[in-house]
Image: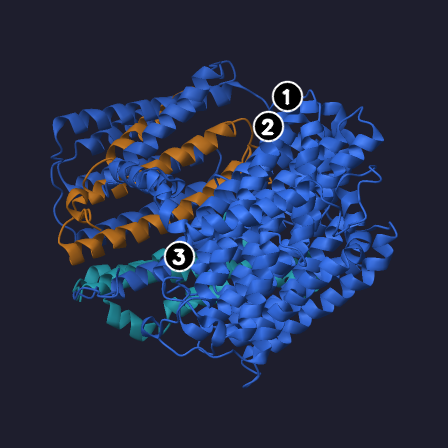
Chain colours: A blue, B orange, C cyan
Amino acid sequence: MYLIISAILLPFAAAALIPLIHNRLGRLNIGWLALAIPLSLFAFFVYQIPAISAGETFTETLYWLPSIGIDMTVYLDGLGLIMALLITGVGSLVILYSIYYLSAADSLPHFYAYLMLFMGAMLGVVLSDNLMVLYVFWELTSISSFLLIAFWYHRKNSRAGAQKSLLITVFGGFAMLAGFLMLHTMTGTFSVRQIAVELTQYANHELFYPAMFLVLLGAFTKSAQFPFHIWLPDAMEAPTPVSAYLHSATMVKAGIYLVARFTPIFGGNSAWFWTVTLVGLVTLFWGAFNAIRQTDLKALLAYSTISQLGLIMSLLGLGSAAMQTGITAEAAAVYGLASFAALFHMVNHSTFKGALFMAVGIVDHQVGTRDIRRLGGLMAFLPFTFTIAIIGSASMAGLPFFNGFLSKEMFFTASLEALNMEMFGLGTWGWLVPVIAWAASVLTFVYCAIIVFRTFFGAHKPEKLDKIPVEPPFGMLLPPAILSFLIVAVFFFPNLLGDHLLRPALNGVLPGITGAAPHIKAWHGFNTELWMTVAIVVFGTILFISFRKWKGIYKLFPAGWTFNALYTNSLKGIERASSYLTNSYMTGHLPHYFAYIFSFFVIAAGGTLIWSGALNIDLANDSPLSVYEILLVVVMAMAAVAILFAKSRVSAILLNGVLGFSIAMFFVLFRAPDLALTQLVIETVTTVLFLVCFNYLPDWKKENSPKHVKVRNTIIAITGGLTITLIGLSVNSADLYETISGYFEDSYELAGGRNIVNAILGDFRALDTLLEGLVLFIAGIGVFSLIRLKVRKEPNDNEN
Amino acid sequence: METLIIILVGVLTAVAIYLVLSRNLIRVILGTAIFSHAVHLLILTMGGLKNGTVPLLGEDATIFVDALPQALILTAIVISFAVTAFVLVLAYRAYQELGTDDLEEMRGADDE
Amino acid sequence: MKINDVILKTVAKAVVLVILTFGLYLFFSGHHTPGGGFIGGLVLASGFVLLFLSYDVETVSEGIPISFKKMSALGVLISMTSALVPVFFGQPFLSQSFGYFDLPIFGKTELATVTIFEAGIALTVVGVVVNIILSISEGTK
C-alpha cells in the first residue's frame, strides 16, 4: 500500500485535472472541488496522529533508479507529520479564503492548479527521505511559488518579484544540490536517515564543511534569512492567499524544516551551531527593525515573517547543541528545549501570521488599499476583521492569553540557558543571545501595534479611500476566524499539541534525547522571562508613541547600499556583460562563424593530438602503390588547387567534376563497385544541377577580401588540412580496436544476400538507410518550397 | 598507398576550408562539395585499402575488403547530394530575393 | 525551354530506354551483385533527367503523367511501412526476413522483404532527384 506516496501524488493529479474539468463545471467555482483535496489529505494525516505520537514511523519505497540509489522513499515521522498537517490544514483554509478573495475575472484554473502543484511539491519535500527526490520537490516548490507570485503577470512588479524569488531560491537550491552530492560522496547514500547514522565518522573529511555550508545556503535562501531575505517582501505581489500560504505558513518553512531534518546529521558541530544561531538572530533583528518603517501592510507582514523565521532558525541553532557528543542527558534536555520551542513557534507562527495575512487581505479587498497612510478607524466598519487582527497581532507580540506568548517565553528561557552553556565559547558571547532576542521582541511589539492602531484606530479617512468598507462574506471570515480560535485554544490547552505532535516531532530533530519536551505551562512564576515580557510591553509602547521622533534613524542607511541595490545592480551588470560578450563575436557574418568553427577544430583536435602524444606515424602497413594511383592522386591534387584559381564558374564546376570522377575511379581501384556506380551517377547529376543553377546566379567574381583576411583564411585552411592529415595518419598507424566488419561477412546466412554492402544498407543498418531516404525527401520538399516561396516585401509589424 | 591518400585528403580539406571561408556563396557551396569528397576518401582509407577482394560473397575468395565503410560512404554520398542541391537552390533563391551573392552584403543589419 | 535538336531527341529516346532498363536491372540485382535501391533509383532518375533535358518539360509530362512529388512521398511511405510491419509480428523495428520458394517460371527463387524496403528507397530517390531538377527549371518561369 503506497498510501503516503499517493497522498503526495494526489495534488499533482489534481493540478493536471483542474484545467481539464474547469470548462465543464459551468458556474460552480472550481475552488470548491480543489478544497476537497487538502481537506481529505488533512483528514488522512490527522488519522495518523495516534500512531505517530505512540512513536511509530512509516516508510514506503517506490523504486525509481535503484542502481544509483535514487528511489522515491517517503518517511513519515513526527517532524514530517507536523509539517504535513500545516501544509494541508492551512492549505484548506487558504483555498476556502481564495474562493471569495479572487474575482471571477482571474484565471481560476491556473491559480488552483499552481496551488495544487505547490501543495504536492511541499508534501514531497517534508516526506521524502531520499535527498535527490527531496531536491526535485524542493525546486518544484520554487517553481510553483514563481508561478503564483507572477499570477497577476500583467503587473510589472509581479514579474520582477517572481523573477527575484526564483533567482534567489533556485541559486540556493543549486548550492543545496551540490551539498547533497558531497554528502553522497562521503557516505555513499542519499537517504537522510542513513546519512545521519554514517556521517559522524566523516567529521574530518575535507567535504564535511563545504557540504554543511552548501546545505545551509539552500535552507537560508528558502527561508529568507539575512542577507537572502530580500526576495520575500517583493513576493508580496502575489495574491494575498498565496502570501498567507506559501510566503508565511509553508514554503518559507521548508528551510526551517531542512535545518531541523539535518540537525541529527550536523548537530553538535560548533560551526553549525554558530552559523544557524547567528544568522537566525541577525535575521530576527533586521526583519523586525525594517518591518516598522513599512507603509504597506503586506510588506510589513513580510518583514515580520522574515523576523519570525529568524527566531525559529536561531532556536534550532541553539537546540543543535544538544547533539554534542559527551554531553550529559540533563544538559541535552535543557538545550533541547530550544528545538522544542522552535517547533512550537513554527506552528504558532503559521496560525497567527496566517490569520493576520487573511485579515490584511480582507482590508485590501474591502477597502481597496493596504497603505497604512490611507487607512485608519476601520474598527467601526470591520469589527470581525478587527478582532481577528488584534488576536493575531497580540499573539505575534507575545502577549498572554495567546499562543505566541508561550513560545516567546520558551525562546527567552532557551536564550537565557545559553548563558550557562560552557561549550562553543558561549561563556564570553552568550549574553548577546538574550539581548538580541529581547531587543527584537520590543521591535516586534512596535510593529504589531502599528498593524492594529494605524489600521483600525485613529481617524477614518474616507477622502483617501475608493470605497466604503463593509464586512466581507462569511466564507472569507471563516478561515481567519478558525486560525484565531486556534491561537487562543493553543494557549489554554498547549499540551494537547505538545504531547501529540511536538514531542514526536522533536524526536525527529533530536533523536535519542529524552526529556527535552517539557510540560508547557502558561504561568511559571515571577521569573526573568516574565519580567522581560513586561519590559517589552513598556518599552514597546514608548517606542510606538515616540515613533515620529526616532523615525530619522532609517535615513542613516544610504539608499544605494542596500542588498536590494546589490541584487539589482549585479543583475543589470550580468545582462550588460553577457550582451557585450555575445555582440562581440555574434557578428552576423557567416565567414566569421566558419572561421571560429575551423579554428576551434584545429586547436581542439590538433592540440589534443599533440598534447596527448597520440601523434604516431608508421608507414609499415601501407599497401603497395601503382602508377595509375599516383597519377590519379596528382590529378586530383592539381584539380583541387586549380579550383582556387579558376577564372570562371564553369571551369570551377568542371574541376569539381574531375574530383568527383577521380574519386569514382578510386572506388573502382579500391574494390568498391557499389560506391563507384553511385558516385558516377551522383557526380553527373550534381554537375547538371550546378550548371542549371548557374543560369540564374551572377557571375563568378574575383575574391575581393582584404589581404589580412586572405592570409588568415589561408592559415586556417592549411592548418586545418594539416590537422586532418596528421589525425588520419595517426589513426591509420595505430591499431587500437579489432574491426567489427567480420560480422557482416556472414551476410548470406544472416540476410540472404551475397552483396555485403547492400546487406548492410538494407538489413544490418537499415535504420541509416531509412533515415537517409527521409533526409533526401526533406531536401526535396525544401527545394520545392524554396522555389515556390515568395518573400513578402512589406515589413512585418508583428515582430518585437 | 594509405599515406598518399591521407595527404590527398589533407589537400582537399585545405582547399575546401579556404573555399568555405570565402565571401562568395558559390565558392562556399563548392567548398562543402569538396569537403564531402575528402571525407568519403578518408572513411574509405580508414578501413584499409586493397587488403582483400570486392565484398561480394559469390567471388571465390576468403578475404574481403572492409564493407562497413563502403556502406557508410554510400549513405553519405546520397545525403551530400541532397544537401548540395538544397544549398544551391537556397543560394539561387537568396540571390533572387536579395540581389547579391556576397555574404558580407547579406549580413543582417546591426540592430536586429 | 524549347529545344529543337532532332539528333539529340532521337538518340535520347533509345538511350533513355537502355538507361531505364539498366536501372531496373541494378535495382533487382543489388542483393547479390553491385546495385540496389539507391543506385537503381539514381540511374532511373538520371534517365528521366536526360529525357527532360532533351525534350521540354511539357512534352515529357504529357507522355509520362507521373507526379514525382507524390512518387517520393510514396517511397517514404513504403519503406516506413515495411519497417513497421515486423513490429506487429513481435520482431524489432526494421527486421528483414527472406526465404526460398519454388516459382513456376523462375525455379528456385529467393524472396526477401528487403526488396520492398529497397523499392521504397528507390522510389524516393527517383522522385526527389527528378523533382529537384524539375523545380529548378520550372522556378525560372
Distance of mark 3 from mark 1, alpha carbons? 48 Å
Same-chain status of marks 3 and 1: yes
- Is B84 displayed left or right of C21 in the figure? left
Q: Are marks 2 and 1 in contact (CB under 8 Å)?
A: yes
- In this figure, which residue is indicated by the disc labeled 3? A295
Labels 3 and 1 touching (C-beta < 8 A): no
Subunit of mark 1?
A
The disc placed on residue A566 is none
| Mark 2 residue type | Pro
Q: Chain of mark 3?
A: A
Q: Which residue is mark 1?
A: A206
* Secondary structure category for the residue under label 1: loop
Residue C10 visible in the shown view: no
Residue kind at label 1, given as amino acid type = Glu
Quadrant of the image occupied by residue A491:
bottom right
Query: What's the mark number on residue A210?
Result: 2
Pointer 2: residues within 10 angstroms few (<14), some, or many (20+)? Answer: some
Q: Chain of mark 2?
A: A
- In three-dimensional space, the C-alpha distance between marks 2 and 1, rounded to whole angstroms, equals 8 Å
Task: Say what secondary structure mark 3 lies in.
Answer: loop
